[in-house]
Image (cartoon, rainbow, N blue to C red):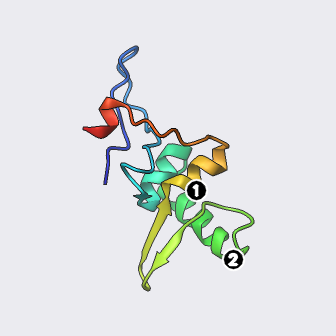
Amino acid sequence: MGEVSHQCPNCGCNEPRLPHPEVTPMLRVEEAGSILGFSRRRSYREVNRWFETGGREGIPAIRFGPRTLRVPTARLYALFGIGVSQEISSDEAA
């Protein structure tokens, strides 16, 4: 998995960031929740809501087997209304 946090060059903060889908196609639920500012508990609650509502509400996710959940990065881009650029910045490619 790619890095979800980055060191901001302007202020030095370590805020979560949404990685490019080609670099990191899937995120763990905790990583996606961190980007959204959710606690671990709320992140899983929102993923479960996604399944319960048939994808109308919550954090979009894919279930792999009985215990593994992943959040597609491209779906988060779509959720935020962000178009995915074909260019990958140098810090994401590293």
In the picture, which quadrant includes the N terminus?
Answer: bottom left
Looking at the image, the residue that sits furthest to the bottom is 66
Q: Earlier in the sequence, mark 2 or mark 1?
A: 2
In the picture, which quadrant includes the C terminus?
Answer: top left
Q: Residues within 10 Å of mark 2 (few under 14, many from 20)?
A: few
Q: x, y percentage for residue 89?
A: 37, 31
Amino acid type, label 2: Glu
**Residue at 38 percent of width and 24 percent of height:** 13
Indicate the secondary structure of the residue bearing disc 2: helix
Q: Quadrant of residue 46?
A: bottom right
Q: x, y percentage for residue 24?
A: 38, 52
Looking at the image, the residue that sits furthest to the left is 94
Quick check: 73 left or right of 22? right
- Above-or-below relation of 90 to 19: above
The circle on residue 89 is none
Residue underneath mark 2: 52
Mark 2 and mark 1 residues within 8 Å of each other at the beta carbon: no
Q: Residues within 10 Å of mark 1 (few under 14, many from 20)?
A: some
Q: Nearer the viewer, mark 2 or mark 1?
A: 1
Q: x, y percentage for residue 49?
A: 66, 69
Q: CA distance from mark 2 to mark 1?
A: 17 Å
Q: Quadrant of residue 7?
A: top left
Identify which residue, 21 or 44, lies in the foreground: 21
Amino acid type, label 1: Arg
For the image shown, how many numbered marks are present on the structure?
2
Residue underneath mark 1: 75
Looking at the image, the residue that sits furthest to the front is 86
**Residue at 54 percent of width and 59 percent of height:** 43
Q: x, y percentage for residue 45?
A: 59, 66
